[in-house]
């Protein structure tokens, strides 16, 4: 009986230890993995170099692939380029290609969706537009001091306004109390798709006053 009792006590103790180990694993979230999600399409080189992580609109580390918008795929020739944004009426996509160790955009799914909805009323023509925004932050507080177009401005005024409104709602997170990154560029592309029966010529006439020469 003594041996049986000892054996039962041993089994009970082992079971308790196993449960505690299992609970500890769950509470700690298990082993941490920083492996980027496997993308659709062929994986392409990191636009800013292999030493940089690529972060998407949901704060996840990802890879650039041939399934991404064309504007995301090319190599970056400007060291000031930190973000690439592609907007349609159905999606809002971001790729941070530089500096994620020091600065990141806070996830804002609701705001992203609202910006996409802004494009619905312009889906009367198949049209691609783009612009480059320069953002300058206060070197001590990280507060935004300047937001302006830099070298490239959208051809349609209303799309330029949407881009400016989008940048102003961004909230940034910094690795240090005093920001390391105080200046960055955001490269925007906007894609409109004709989902109405309106002809191209009609829309062009309506937009005549909105289209600016580069």
Image: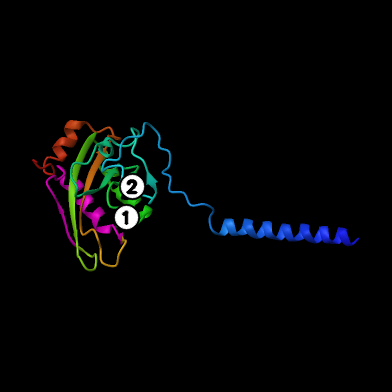
Q: Determine the residue positioned at 54% across, 58% down.
A: 28
In the rendering, at what x and y percent does residue 41 appear? 38, 32
Local packing at callout 1 (Cα closer than 10 Å; few below 14, some 14-19, many 20+) is few
Furthest toward the right, the residue is: 1
Q: Determine the residue positioned at 20% across, 46% down.
A: 159
Name the mark on residue 180.
none
Local packing at callout 2 (Cα closer than 10 Å; few below 14, some 14-19, many 20+) is many
Above or below, 51 relative to 165: above
Above or below, 139 relative to 73: below
Residue under numbered circle 1: 101
Chain-order first, disc 1 or disc 2: 2
Q: CA distance from mark 1 to mark 2?
A: 8 Å
Which one is nearer the viewer's eye here, 16 or 55? 16
In the rendering, at what x and y percent does residue 157 appear? 15, 47
Furthest toward the left, the residue is: 213
Q: Give the residues in magenta.
A: 145-173
Residue 88, quarter of picture: top left
In the rendering, at what x and y percent does residue 30 appear? 54, 53
Q: Determine the residue positioned at 20% across, 40% down.
A: 129
Residue under numbered circle 2: 53
In the rendering, at what x and y percent does residue 201 appear? 16, 31
| Image quadrant occupied by the N terminus | bottom right
Which one is nearer the viewer's eye here, 32 or 204? 32
| Image quadrant occupied by the C terminus | top left
Helix, strand or loop at label 2? It is loop
Q: Does 145 sit left or right of 70 as displayed?
A: left
Furthest toward the front, the residue is: 3
Which one is nearer the viewer's eye here, 97 or 202? 97
């Amino acid at each position: 009986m003594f041996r049986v009792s000892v054996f039962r006590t041993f089994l009970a103790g082992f079971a308790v230890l196993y449960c505690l180990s299992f609970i500890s694993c769950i509470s700690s979230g298990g082993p941490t993995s920083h492996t980027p999600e496997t993308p659709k399409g062929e994986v392409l080189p990191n636009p800013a170099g292999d030493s940089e992580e690529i972060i998407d609109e949901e704060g996840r580390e990802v890879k650039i692939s041939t399934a991404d918008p064309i504007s995301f795929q090319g190599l970056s020739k400007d060291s000031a380029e930190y973000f690439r944004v592609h907007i349609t009426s159905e999606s809002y996509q971001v790729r941070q290609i530089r500096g994620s160790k020091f600065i990141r955009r806070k996830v804002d799914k609701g705001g992203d969706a609202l910006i996409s909805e802004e494009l619905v009323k312009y889906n009367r023509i198949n049209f691609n537009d783009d612009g480059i925004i320069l953002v300058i932050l206060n070197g001590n507080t990280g507060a935004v001091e300047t937001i302006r177009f830099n070298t490239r401005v959208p051809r349609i005024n209303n799309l330029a306004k949407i881009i400016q409104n989008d940048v102003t709602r961004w909230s940034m997170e910094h690795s240090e109390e005093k920001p390391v990154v105080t200046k960055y560029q955001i490269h925007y592309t906007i894609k409109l798709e004709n989902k109405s029966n309106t002809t191209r010529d009609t829309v062009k006439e309506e937009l005549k006053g909105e289209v600016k020469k580069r």
